[in-house]
Image (spheres, helix red, strand yellow):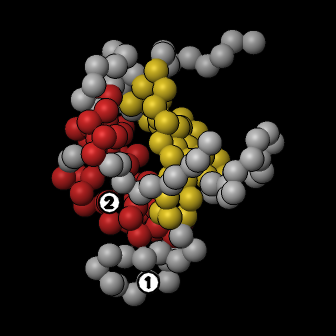
Amino acid sequence: MEVINRVYPNEEEIKGFLDPGTEGPICMVYLLKFKAKAEYEDGRETDLTGREAYELYTKGVKNLLQGVGGCIGFEGDVERLTLGEVEELWDLVALAVWPSRQLMLEVMQSQGMREIGLHRTAGLAGQLNIETAGFAGHWLEG
């Protein structure tokens, strides 16, 4: 299995947001890899690490997400790989619950997202985003 981290979706991935999918909430799984040092596209000098720049983005995303009835359900540093093999591990795993795929797309295209997106680009070396369906607001029962 080849794994390719990206910062932004390609055209085919964007079109996927317009495909019919499960109605209702989705849970996005984010596997994030940070740059050692933040690199802003406008060339500004900064002492921020990639993680610190991304944290600025995360604060803004949490506000946007809450504004549409979603939430960040989990964030955790990757400690180790317990099964399988990859060349390099991600730094952070996060789960975000969105009320719908359509609302996620609307937020991604919003002015608010454009205002904070520079921190995302500055901080991320790459990521994998995995959409999951069937999340009904409950966790696995034991």
Q: Work out whether mark 1 precedes mark 2 in sequence or the reverse, and give the earlier one.
A: 1
Q: Residue furthest top?
A: 141
Q: Residue furthest front?
A: 1
> Which residue bears the numbered disc 1?
46
Residue 24 sits in which quadrant?
top left
Q: Residue 50's x, y, as percent?
A: 51, 70
Q: Is residue 17 above or below residue 59?
A: above
Residue 64 sits in which quadrant?
top left
Q: Residue 21's x, y, as percent?
A: 34, 19
Circle 2: is it few (<14), some (14-19), or many (20+) Cα within 10 Å?
Answer: some
Residue 75 visible? The answer is no
Give left or right: position of 92 versus 53.
right
Residue 59 sits in which quadrant?
bottom left
What residue lies at 36% left-to-right and 54% top-to-bottom?
8
What residue lies at 70% left-to-right and 51% top-to-bottom?
86
Q: Which amino acid does the dot numbered 1 rest on?
A: Thr
What residue lies at 27% left-to-right and 25% top-to-bottom?
19
Give left or right: position of 52 versus 141.
left
Q: Residue 119's x, y, as percent?
A: 38, 65
Q: Residue furthest left?
A: 111
> Which residue bears the numbered disc 2?
117
Residue in front for this viewpoint, 11 or 119: 11
> Mark 1 and mark 2: span between their CA atoms?
16 Å
Residue in front for this viewpoint, 59 or 85: 85
Residue in front for this viewpoint, 50 or 6: 6
Judged from the image, the secondary structure of the residue bearing numbered disc 1 is loop
Q: Residue 103's x, y, as percent?
A: 27, 31
Judged from the image, the secondary structure of the residue bearing numbered disc 2 is helix
Q: Quadrant of the N terminus?
A: top right
Q: Is residue 72 above or below residue 20?
A: below
Q: Residue furthest right?
A: 82
Circle 1: is it few (<14), some (14-19), or many (20+) Cα within 10 Å?
Answer: few
